[in-house]
């Protein structure tokens, strides 16, 4: 059990009003969690302090070699005033999996959960309650050793910051347009694609800029070897409904194992909807589109929740899905998952954890 010191701010900021659109990732709460690490000493000095800039040496290793892990989860306020986290243990387990992959020391699971609960409790008043909003929680670790040479750092900072958010995409629950990338790749098996680390996201920027210029919100990645199997969207995992069956790419080592992805698979299995995790080629998707059996496409992610896809562009081919509206399965999944998160639907899976 951590002995977390709490230093409250003397100058609290004004809370965003209910009508604030809460543009994703732009507003930060009054406090943050921070804990240091040093080789030989372990994790030490856990504290909640006022949200503020941090000071690092220009030689801090994270700036040069990108040794960094991050996570994303959300807190929700129920109608009867409870604060719930959604499946935080999945994020903690994944964080440590990322840590192992990129040689960051693991954070004991119970300490991680305690840190999450403590900082969320301190800034509980910041959890927005309007439909479609939540408090986004961003835990991350950075390598802070002042050293220019490639090896794991001996010093780290573990921090948790909080941000009241609305929808990740400006489109909200309206379908997004997705560009299928055929020039660059995001990750390959054996690389870091299944780790949640900044390097995967910087690798996506060039394509994202190109997609934006063409009027598309996001990029759908194909595999890095055959350049034909569907992987993920970077900010979300992807699902297709083809002829009554749901298919999603299997976790092959280069795809992020999403928490919402896992929840969707669990719910579909429970509802008796046929679901397959397997390799899906882009030709199979285009073929289904041409036959008229591509019934729904949606992305899943903590930030994106369930995000319907209304159009896919692959080379010169434009695939229009669901006439630009959200499909019935996507809507049911969205209603069920957000219903459980907000305590409106009975949580039979023990997915929510009260703060
Ligand atoms: C999340 O869904 O929490 C993520 O980390 C995706 C990120 C690109 C916002």
Image (cartoon, helix red, strand yellow):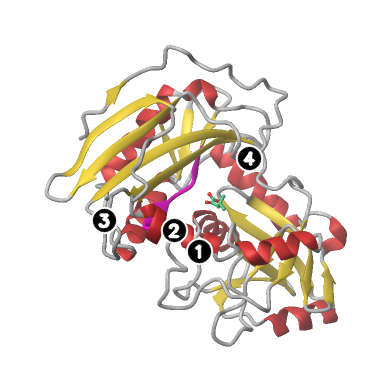
Quadrant containing the N terminus is top left
Mark 2 or mark 3, earlier in chain: 3
Mark 3 or mark 1, earlier in chain: 3
- Say if the magenta span includes residue 96: no
Name the residue beneath numbered marker 1. 200
- Mark 2 vs mark 1, CA separation in Å: 6 Å
Mark 4 or mark 3, earlier in chain: 4
Instruction: From this view, report whether residue 26 is shown above or below residue 156.
Output: above
Name the residue beneath numbered marker 4. 24
- Comparing labels 3 and 1, the label whose residue is closer to the camera: 3
Instruction: From this view, report whether residue 299 is shown above or below residue 180.
Output: above
Number of numbered discs visible in the structure rendering: 4
What stretch of residues is rendered in magenta? 67-74
Name the residue beneath numbered marker 2. 197
Instruction: From this view, report whether residue 190 is shown above or below residue 193.
Output: below
- Say if the magenta span includes residue 73: yes
């Amino acid at each position: 059990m951590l002995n977390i010191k709490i230093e409250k701010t003397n100058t609290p900021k004004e809370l965003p009003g209910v009508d604030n659109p809460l543009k994703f990732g732009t507003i930060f709460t009054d406090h943050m969690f921070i804990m240091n690490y040093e080789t030989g000493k372990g994790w030490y000095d856990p504290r909640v302090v006022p949200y503020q800039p941090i000071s690092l040496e220009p030689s801090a290793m994270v700036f040069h070699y990108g040794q960094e892990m991050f996570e994303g989860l959300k807190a929700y306020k129920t109608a009867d005033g409870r604060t719930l986290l959604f499946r935080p243990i999945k994020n903690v387990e994944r964080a440590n999996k990322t840590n192992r992959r990129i040689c960051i020391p693991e954070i004991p699971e119970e300490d991680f959960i305690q840190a999450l609960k403590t900082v969320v409790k301190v800034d509980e008043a910041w959890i927005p309650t309007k439909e479609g909003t939540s408090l986004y929680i961003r835990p991350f670790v950075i390598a802070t050793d002042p050293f220019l040479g490639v090896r794991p750092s001996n010093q780290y900072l573990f921090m948790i910051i909080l941000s009241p958010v609305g929808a990740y995409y400006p489109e909200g629950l309206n379908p997004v347009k997705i560009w299928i990338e055929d020039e660059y790749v995001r990750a390959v098996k054996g690389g870091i694609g299944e780790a949640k680390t900044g390097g995967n996201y910087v690798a996506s920027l060039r394509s994202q800029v190109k997609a934006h210029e063409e009027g598309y919100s996001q990029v759908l990645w194909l595999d890095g070897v055959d350049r034909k199997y569907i992987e993920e969207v970077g900010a979300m995992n992807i699902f297709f409904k083809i002829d009554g069956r749901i298919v999603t790419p299997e976790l092959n080592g280069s795809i992020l194992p999403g928490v919402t992805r896992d929840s969707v698979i669990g719910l579909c299995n429970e509802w008796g909807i046929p679901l397959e995790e397997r390799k899906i080629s882009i030709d199979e998707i285009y073929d289904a589109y041409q036959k008229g059996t591509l019934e729904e496409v949606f992305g899943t992610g903590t930030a994106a929740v369930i995000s319907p896809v209304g159009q896919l562009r692959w080379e010169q081919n434009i695939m229009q899905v669901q006439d630009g509206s959200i499909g019935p399965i996507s809507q049911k999944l969205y209603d069920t998952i957000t219903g459980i998160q907000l305590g409106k639907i009975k949580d039979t899976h023990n997915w929510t954890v009260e703060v």
